[in-house]
Amino acid sequence: MTEIAIYKFDGHEIVDQFISLVNPEREIQPFVVNLTGINSNMLKNAPKFYEIAKRIVEITEGCIIVAHNAKFDYRILRVEFKRLEYEFKRKTLCTVELSKKLIPDMDSYSLGKLVRALGIPLSDRHRASGDAQATLKLFKLLLSKDTEKTIIQEKIRVEPKFQIEPRLKDIIDEAPTATGVYYMHKDDGEIIYIGKSKNIKKRINQHFTGTTPKSKKMQLMVTAVTYEKTGSELVALLKESEEVKRKKPIFNRALRRSIFTHALYSFEDENGYINLKIDKADGRKQPITTFSNRQSAKSFMFKIVQDYKLCQKLTGLYPTKSNCFNYTIKECEGACVQEEDIINYNNRVQKIIDKYSYDNQNMVIIDRGRDIDERSAILIENGVFKGLGFYNLNYQINNIEILESIITPMENNRDVQHIIQNYVRRNKRLKVVQLENTQT
């Protein structure tokens, strides 16, 4: 061993770190010098392993060692400790094995080639700190791609502090005041409830101070709460919807049903005008957009009639056999009585359809990320929601191959379409990037 770098990661951020050169008390082989740039002269005054052993034990206490090819790193550590007649035992996770499972079909799983393919910056290759930082960034990506939550659930199973009687106040204290998704676990790691909130701490506090029968049952069963910051409320909504359907937690029955009731449809009448109509959502028909209830649908319709100078009659807001009320006050151009040019009217309606429906579109919706230098990306190809991910660098979003690698695939369904359309409708300043050529 010539160098060691350890970053202690709590699932969200680095909470401690230790980086040091190590004097191996022997000459370094030439190929190692060429690979790492570390030579014997640099190590003359470096601490010997026994001088840093206590710090390694302390920083890894109660932790799982995550490494790229973890068997190799763990074996080297155990050999060094064995020379000191100390048995060093820790659980390990290998990012090579996790990558093969969660990001299949990559050309190579070597650390350098893998992070390059994923657009993860890698500096000081073959130096301990550079490789450890790249492995940490890779591990964060793998955590977000682990939709089954096997990594987190296994950690809770082996973590002894979760086996004792839970102290709900401690759980609340550790929760962040951030936007994201949270997961309530039983003592065996099983997820019993999934929720999302703009303020996770506040929402968990409501669960644990609630007096309803459901709240009381949850309080008795919960031994741990894990969470994922998302930064974006849209990402939190999509993750909650997907994971509730996937995991089917016992306290999430309500979210298993569809979350929208009404939809906006279009049809051409006998005079050639495109009509818009609010109706109950029908799974057999393709809607322009969907709504949580009839009232929000009608509010939307009144607004677009005003903004686009549409006819009240042709939008179903003013049932009549003659002209609509707006025609009387000269706010309708007369489509209701076939006075307005059909092409002009239909062009305005088509603008609404194009704006609020992402049917057949290739685009990325950009929103807030988990950190100030990060953004979230929701990928839509040919009008189909493909999944979401996070990125730090613009070239990750402009290179479709890298973009598809960092995206966590998710199911496209009507609930997801409703969530995206509703969010885009409410957030006018949301950045949407149109993709020219996509590869699937």
Image (tube, grey):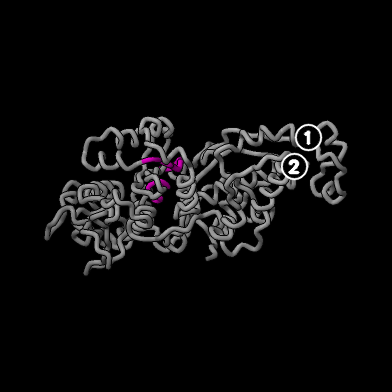
Quarter of the figure with the N terminus: top right
Q: Nearer the viewer, residue 438 or 95?
A: 95
Residues shaded magenta: 223-239
Q: Which mark is residue 279?
A: none
Q: Is residue 60 above or below residue 320?
A: above
The residue singled out by tag 2 in the image is: 83
Q: For residue 174, which quarter of the picture?
A: top left
Q: Is residue 108 above or below residue 422?
A: below
* Residue at 57 percent of width and 44 percent of height: 64
- Asked which secondary structure carries label 1, the reply is loop
Could you tell whether 8 is left or right of 264 in the image?
right
The residue singled out by tag 1 in the image is: 48
Q: Nearer the viewer, residue 171 or 240?
A: 171
Extreme residue toward the bottom, this view? 270
Could you tell whether 439 is left or right of 4 in the image?
left
Q: Position of residue 54 (x, y in %)?
A: 67, 32
Q: For residue 161, which quarter of the picture?
A: top left
Q: Is residue 302 visible?
A: yes
Q: Nearer the viewer, residue 432 or 36?
A: 36
Q: Position of residue 204 (x, y in %)?
A: 34, 36
Q: Is residue 162 above or below residue 104?
A: above
Amino acid type, callout 2: Arg
Amino acid type, callout 1: Lys
